Image: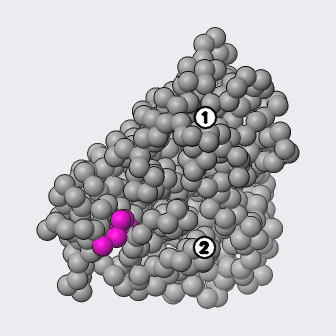
């Protein structure tokens, strides 16, 4: 079936990845539909840790204030034994914010609230989630994708994005291999519960012969997130089963059980993240152990990487080859993060604490890069080992007018930073590039830095001619009459 697409992008799945992609497309003005097979909003706290890089993305998308108002820092850990606390420690490395890195530790927010905030933002941008709309199949051709829905309807789109979770229908229809390993053979359960009388100042843990249990207070609620491992037997997610488990292992009484879900910790990744006009993002492309709070955050970055590229191809005249960069940039990152979450889950060789293993700066996702990706160009020489390079995340800072760089980066344009630069600036299209001068930025060094819409350094150079060449190759546009971006 050919014909003109009814929408530019069809997104299957309204979890964090699907919602972030929809918000990004909506603010660019890209026509899309976001469908989800579920009857309504996700009810659980599952992915409750937001890493610093995700907070930066949420600032760009306009949801940071709501996220900060609804969440809190991760509390200190406490280990219980024989009815008393015997040890306290921090699970995360706590660092003070800097000008370059405004967020330096994770932020805790129940997943249901994260998704609610993103849905509210999407609605403010004019979009919505179509719940109860299930994709059952599709076929693609040279002009687009025709998707079949469970109600017998069909949707024609230029591109289809599978954000439909670990049991992805989109991935299954593609026949894309999804291989991995069992991180932990013991089944686990996560639940949101009320525990009257338990202090909300700590993340409480118990280690016993029946298996470990952790109860973490969920911010701005009266509930705790329960995580329990089952070295023997299978989880019983019924309210009675959850109450019995907590009473037997902790001696505490559980009141209401709001939500419960059994799972097995697994690490798996799709062999490909793109097949023609179909893309995989989030859990459809990779699933993680919950340890280290990497899964949701990696999913958000998938969507953020893909969103601007779809917008520039569909609306700004960028070559279709720009979309070829999605898989070679995101697949290696996902593979690295899968390894990290697995190591955190299993813990050091001399201990077995999958629920309480310490997480360091490597979990913050600020150091993930696209240096070897197809969009990274670094034309400078003589760089030191610690120098910022093309493909790295662009740090925050202040421009010549005292404006934060992250504010300058906001939106779907490229940003040209002229750092410690006294020569003539290259001509660029105002619609494509916003230009800012920066007198001094130690994190950058001296030169011209072209920042991609997703906040990564695309080009680093000291030759203005390289800017036009890069934009011609990547964005399909060279210099325009009237020239330099105004930084608006």
Residue 152 located left or right of residue 384 = left
Q: Is residue 219 visible?
A: no
Vertical order, 94 against 220 (above or below): above
Neighbor class of circle 1 (other Cα within 10 Å; few <14, some 14-19, many 20+) is many
Query: Which of these two is toward me, 438 or 350?
Result: 438
Which badge, 2 or 1, is on the more N-terminal residue?
2
Q: Which residue is mark 2?
A: 121
Disc 2 element:
helix
Q: Position of residue 226 (x, y in %)?
A: 59, 71
Query: Which of these two is toward me, 135 or 27?
Result: 27
Q: Residue furthest left?
A: 1
Q: Residue furthest right?
A: 402
User: Which tag is nearer the camera, tag 2 or tag 1?
Assistant: 1
Residue 397 occupies quadrant:
top right
Mark number, residue 20: none
Name the residue at 56% across, 24% down: 465
Residue 151 occupies quadrant:
bottom left
Name the residue at 61% across, 25% down: 464
Q: Which residue is mark 1?
A: 427
Q: Which residues are magenta?
A: 6-12
Vertical order, 249 against 158 (above or below): below
Q: Position of residue 159 (x, y in %)?
A: 31, 60
Give the dominant element type of the magenta stretch: helix, strand or loop: strand
Residue 90 located left or right of residue 412 = right
Q: Residue furthest front?
A: 481
Between the residue at mark 2 and the residue at mark 1, the CA separation in whole angstroms equals 35 Å
Q: Position of residue 146 (x, y in %)?
A: 21, 69
């Amino acid at each position: 079936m050919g014909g003109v697409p009814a929408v530019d992008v069809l997104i299957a799945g309204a979890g964090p990845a699907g919602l972030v992609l929809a918000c990004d497309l909506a603010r660019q003005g890209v026509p899309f539909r976001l469908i989800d097979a579920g009857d309504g909003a996700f009810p659980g706290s599952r992915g409750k840790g937001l890493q610093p890089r995700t907070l930066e993305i949420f600032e760009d998308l306009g949801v940071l204030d709501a996220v900060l108002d609804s969440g809190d820092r991760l509390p200190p850990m406490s280990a219980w034994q024989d009815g008393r606390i015997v040890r306290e420690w921090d699970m995360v490395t706590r660092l003070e914010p800097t000008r370059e890195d405004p967020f330096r530790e994770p932020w805790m927010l129940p997943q249901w609230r994260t998704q609610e905030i993103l849905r509210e933002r999407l609605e403010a941008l004019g979009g919505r989630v179509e719940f109860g709309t299930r994709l059952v199949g599709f076929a693609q051709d040279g002009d687009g994708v025709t998707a079949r829905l469970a109600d017998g309807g069909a949707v024609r789109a230029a591109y289809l994005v599978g954000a439909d979770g670990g049991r992805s229908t989109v991935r299954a229809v593609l026949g894309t291999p999804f291989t991995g390993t069992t991180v932990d053979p013991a089944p686990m359960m996560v639940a949101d519960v009320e525990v009257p009388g338990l202090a909300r100042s700590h993340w409480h843990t118990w280690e016993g012969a029946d298996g470990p249990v952790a109860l973490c207070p969920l911010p701005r609620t009266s509930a705790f997130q329960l995580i329990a491992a089952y070295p023997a037997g299978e989880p019983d997610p019924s309210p009675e089963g959850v109450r019995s488990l907590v009473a037997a292992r902790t001696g505490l009484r559980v009141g209401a059980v709001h939500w419960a879900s059994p799972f097995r910790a697994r690490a798996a990744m799709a062999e490909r993240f793109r097949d023609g006009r179909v893309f995989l993002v989030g859990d459809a492309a990779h699933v993680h152990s919950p340890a280290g709070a990497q899964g949701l955050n990696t999913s958000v970055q998938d969507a953020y990487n893909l969103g601007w590229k779809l917008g520039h191809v569909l609306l700004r005249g960028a070559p279709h080859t720009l979309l070829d960069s999605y898989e070679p940039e995101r697949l290696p990152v996902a593979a690295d993060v899968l390894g990290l979450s697995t190591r955190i889950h299993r813990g050091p060789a001399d201990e077995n604490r999958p629920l309480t293993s310490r997480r360091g700066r490597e979990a913050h996702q600020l150091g993930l890069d696209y240096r070897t990706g197809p969009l990274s160009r670094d034309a400078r020489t003589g760089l030191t080992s610690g120098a910022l390079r093309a493909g790295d995340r662009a740090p925050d800072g202040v421009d010549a007018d005292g404006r934060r760089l992250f504010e300058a980066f906001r939106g779907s344009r490229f940003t040209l930073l002229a750092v410690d630069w006294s020569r003539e600036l290259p001509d660029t299209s105002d619609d494509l590039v916003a230009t800012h001068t920066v007198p001094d930025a130690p994190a950058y060094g001296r030169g011209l830095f072209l920042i991609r819409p997703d906040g990564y350094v695309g080009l680093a150079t000291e030759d203005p001619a390289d800017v036009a060449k890069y934009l011609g190759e990547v964005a399909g546009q060279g210099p325009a009459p009237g020239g330099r971006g105004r930084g608006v």
